[in-house]
Image (tube, rainbow, N blue to C red):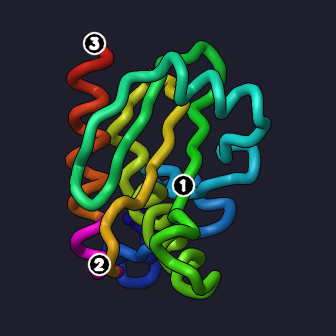
Amino acid sequence: MCIVHCENLACQIIVPFRAKNCELCIVNCELKKHSKLCGQMRIAALYKEGKRFTSWPLRVTFQPTEEETQVLVWAPKSLFKRAVKRNHLRRLMREAYRLHQDLLGDKNYLLAFNYMDKEEQSFAVVEKAVVKALKKITSDGK
């Protein structure tokens, strides 16, 4: 969440997006294209060399990097045959990460979130799993 400052009311309004060109917003809630992990070799290296753990319903793979933090979200076709459901789950994971990416602090990682449950979960469940995973990553990465 970001805080938008209202000049007229002299108050702070919490909104789920960052106001454009706002210098007063304290958290950058954007997830840009360059923050998405792509490239077959980089993804294969992450799965081969990275550490992994489970934060149900997600399996998280991570690896510290010197470059900018990049994220991969994945929902398997073997569990969800319809693309609509897979896209919905990926959207949930991306949104949960976008809102809580500040938990990683200044460290940079390559991250992969794999959805493992056979049924669709609500945003609250996915968000809780992402927050738990990000906290574990920062505690393990030290």
Which three-letter amino acid code belongs to the residue tagged 2? Gln
- CB atoms of marks 3 and 1 within 8 Å: no
* Residue position for label 2: 121
x then y, percent, for residue 77: 57, 69
Q: Is residue 83 magenta?
A: no
Q: Nearer the viewer, residue 24 or 60?
A: 60
| Corner quadrant of residue 107 | top left
Q: Position of residue 90 (x, y in %)?
A: 53, 68
Position of 134 relative to 22 (above/below): above
The residue lying at 66 percent from left, 66 percent from top is 20
Q: How many angstroms separate mark 2 from mark 3 (CA)?
A: 31 Å
Between discs 2 and 3, the one toward the N terminus:
2
Instruction: State the image quarter where residue 39 is shown.
Output: top right
Q: Nearer the viewer, residue 128 or 4?
A: 128
Percent x, y of residue 118: 33, 73
Circle nearer the N terminus (3, 1): 1
Asked if labels 1 and 2 touch by Cβ distance under 8 angstroms, the answer is: no
Name the residue at 57% across, 44% down.
71
Q: Is residue 123 magenta?
A: yes
Answer above or below: position of 82 versus 133: below
Going by the numbered disc 3, the residue's amino acid type is Lys
For residue 142, which numbered disc appears in the image?
A: 3
Q: Is residue 17 visible?
A: no
In this view, the mark in front (2 or 3) = 2
What amino acid is labelled 1 in the image?
A: Val
Looking at the image, is mark 2 or mark 1 earlier in the sequence?
Answer: 1
Q: Nearer the viewer, residue 31 or 119?
A: 119
- The magenta region covers 120-126
- The structure residue drawn at horizontal position 38% and vertical position 23%, both measured from the top left corner, is 51
